[in-house]
């Protein structure tokens, strides 16, 4: 309703894992779960979406474009009769199960952490010459992702820059096995 509301959190309910609460100035006392109270005291990073491409299912994804070293590896588009390979073989039909596997990895991959420092120099993360790029589209959202330097010497973690929301993450490379 575009109004600000404030809530007073009281003491813990005796013998319970809940807390007393009320709308500031109100007379009604509510009992609120401890987990809901903890959500209110979360830090910004706790509230950020940690998923690479947050969707409930892969069904609404309608394109996936994967670029490695500046060359398009594949450009997939969903049509009424299934998935088409636009590049490198135009008009090619692809195995829907393989695309679903890739799409599943994209919506389930969860970041290890965020990079929240000043992002004036993206080259220090390797985004000036990204190893990989992904463009993903769905009915309700799109994302352009750059994969930069590895975070560690073993290559188990990689920096990922979501250009769409201007956020840098660190992901486990194992969670995106189709990339390399």
Image (tube, rainbow, N blue to C red):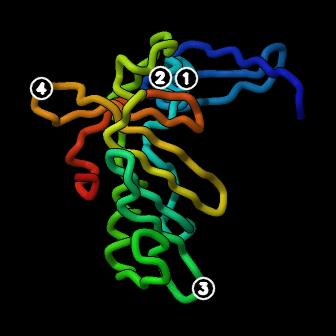
Task: Judge depth for marks 2 and 3 and give the one in front.
Answer: 3
What residue is shown with label 3?
80
Task: Judge depth for marks 3 and 1 and give the one in front.
Answer: 3
What residue is shown with label 2?
45
Task: Judge depth for marks 4 and 2 and give the one in front.
Answer: 4
Left/right of residue 145 with respect to residue 104 in the rendered view: right
Dot 4 and dot 1 residues touching (CB under 8 Å):
no
Q: Nearer the viewer, residue 51 or 91?
A: 91
Q: CA distance from mark 2 to mark 3?
A: 39 Å
Q: Quadrant of residue 96?
A: bottom left
The image shows residue 161 at horizontal and vertical percentages of 45, 33
Left/right of residue 136 with respect to residue 100 in the rendered view: right
Q: Quick one: label 3 or label 1, which is nearer the N terminus?
A: 1
The image shows residue 124 at horizontal and vertical percentages of 35, 17
In the figure, 147 relative to 180: above or below? above
Q: CA distance from mark 4 to mark 3?
A: 44 Å
Q: Quadrant of residue 94?
A: bottom left
What residue is shown with label 4?
153
Q: Quadrant of the N terminus?
A: top right
Left/right of residue 114 with respect to residue 164 in the rendered view: left
Say which residue appears at 46% left-offset and 65% top-offset: 75
Q: Quick one: label 2 or label 1, which is nearer the N terminus?
A: 1
Using a 10 Å C-alpha cutoff, classify the residue at mark 4 as few (fewer than 14 neighbours), some (14 to 19) or many (20 or more).
few
Q: Quick one: label 2 or label 3, which is nearer the N terminus?
A: 2
What residue is shown with label 1?
19
Using a 10 Å C-alpha cutoff, classify the residue at mark 3 as few (fewer than 14 neighbours), some (14 to 19) or many (20 or more).
few
Using a 10 Å C-alpha cutoff, classify the residue at mark 2 as few (fewer than 14 neighbours), some (14 to 19) or many (20 or more).
few
Q: Dot 3: what SS? A: loop
């Amino acid at each position: 309703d575009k109004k600000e509301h404030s809530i007073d959190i009281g003491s813990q309910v005796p013998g319970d894992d809940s807390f007393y609460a009320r709308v500031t100035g109100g007379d009604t006392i509510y009992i609120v779960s401890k987990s809901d109270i903890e959500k209110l005291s979360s830090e910004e990073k706790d509230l950020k979406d940690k998923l690479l491409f947050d969707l409930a299912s892969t069904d609404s994804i309608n394109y996936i474009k994967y670029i490695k070293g500046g060359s398009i590896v594949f450009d997939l588009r969903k049509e009424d009769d299934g998935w088409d390979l636009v590049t490198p073989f135009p008009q090619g039909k692809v195995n829907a199960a393989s695309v679903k596997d890739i799409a599943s990895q994209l919506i389930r991959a969860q970041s290890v952490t965020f990079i929240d420092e000043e992002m004036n120099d993206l080259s220090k993360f390797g985004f000036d010459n990204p190893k990989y790029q992904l463009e993903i589209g769905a009915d309700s959202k799109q994302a352009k992702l750059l994969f930069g330097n590895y975070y560690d010497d073993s290559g188990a973690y990689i920096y990922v820059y979501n250009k769409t929301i201007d956020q840098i993450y660190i992901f486990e490379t194992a969670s995106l096995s189709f990339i390399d």
